[in-house]
Image: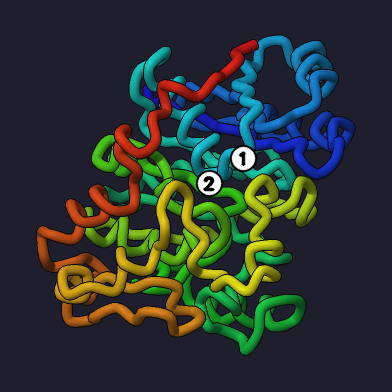
Amino acid sequence: MKKLLSVYNICGHRQDNTQAYLGILPTLLAQKIEGAEHRVVISACKAYAHTIATLKSKFPSVEIFSIEEPYPIAVTFNNTVNLCREKYGEFDAYMYSACDVVYTHARQLDVLFQTMFASEDVAMASSHILYDGCYAFGLKKGGGRHGIDDERAAQEIFSDTDVYTIPVGRAIAHHAALINGKLVQFYGKAMPDVFAGRCSESIVTFLVAALKMRWVIVKLCAPTHLCDLDGPSICNNPVEHIRAGKLPYDHPFKLVSLLPIFFNDTAKQLGLGYEECADVCPHDPSQFDQNQYCINEGLKDYLKDHLFLPSSVFDYSKIQTIIT
């Protein structure tokens, strides 16, 4: 039997959403995954003490991994995933579930899970979230980002398939995404952690293509997105970053700048791109085949070395995590 870890991610930095969590978390706990042992945990950043106490009282079997420092969401998620790997061993897949994603029937995650393991090359499977799915923006479909344009984008991508492979250089928002354990084992973490705010999704197709794998959107997994419950990357305030006159796509964590990672001869030769929805750094399509796989062997190691912080720069073992 395969093992699935689902991580419900919450943050109390902006406001108290305890009551909302009490309504949303049960929809994740109710998911039935055929052929898998399903463990659900909570990853909490700067959560109120009464939030932790209330959730533990209501859901005593759910472990809560809580930290007080205002780290980026990728860091808190990685921290929880790796602590669970240490405690329970490797999982076959890891589910990132945002605090405001509501599962509307008990087999939605099963659809993602079965899609992933029906083939050998699905590294990430994302839910079909219509509202603020960012299909139109990240995929350059439909002509815009929100509302009817996102709807048109969804119609385009699912016009002849229920499982859409995201082309290299494109992206959608991380609201509900299943990550293959193969990706976590190779890169050592579930998500790149050099990003403090936005744009981290724009490099996912390169992470998976470098491993000869794909990122897909699954039409039949369509949970509801309540949108902006805790706030996007709220602990690192991307809005203030932009108001300060800084580039929205150059908001690093523990680095001086993200741009040297992408603007150099090695990255260019390996085919790497970045934030292509805004035409920041286009990739070299000659380095990818018709299956969206990278044809060179150097990209995966370059990404591992440059998009995942070494312990000399940021040591996860020093994060003070309270497990309840």
Q: Quadrant of residue 183?
A: top left
The image quadrant of residue 164 is bottom left
Residue 218: where, in percent of width, then height? 52, 58
Q: Residue 73 — which label?
A: none
User: Which of these two is toward me, 161 or 5?
Assistant: 5
Figure label count: 2
**Image point 61% across, 52% down: which residue?**
175
Can you say which quadrant of the picture contains the N terminus? top left
Q: Residue at x 60, y 79 (%)?
A: 136
Tell me the kind of residue under disc 1. Arg
Q: Position of residue 17 (x, y in %)?
A: 85, 37
Q: Is residue 288 visible from the viewing direction of this image? A: no
Q: Residues within 10 Å of mark 2 (few under 14, many from 20)?
A: some
Q: Quadrant of residue 55?
A: top right
What colour-coding does the image apply? rainbow
Q: Is residue 284 above or below residue 259?
A: below
Question: Where is mark 1, residue-wise?
Answer: 107
Eyeballing the image, is 143 above or below 302? below
Q: How far across and down, in percent of the image, does residue 223 sit? A: 69, 51
Q: Secondary structure at mark 1?
A: loop
Q: Position of residue 28 (x, y in %)?
A: 67, 34
Say whether marks 1 and 2 touch (CB < 8 Å).
yes
Apparent side of residue 288 relative to residue 150 in the rendered image (left or right): left
Residue tagged by mark 2? 111
Q: Residue at x 39, y 22 (%)?
A: 85
Q: Say if 186 sits above or below 66 in the image.
A: below
- Quarter of the picture containing the C terminus is top right
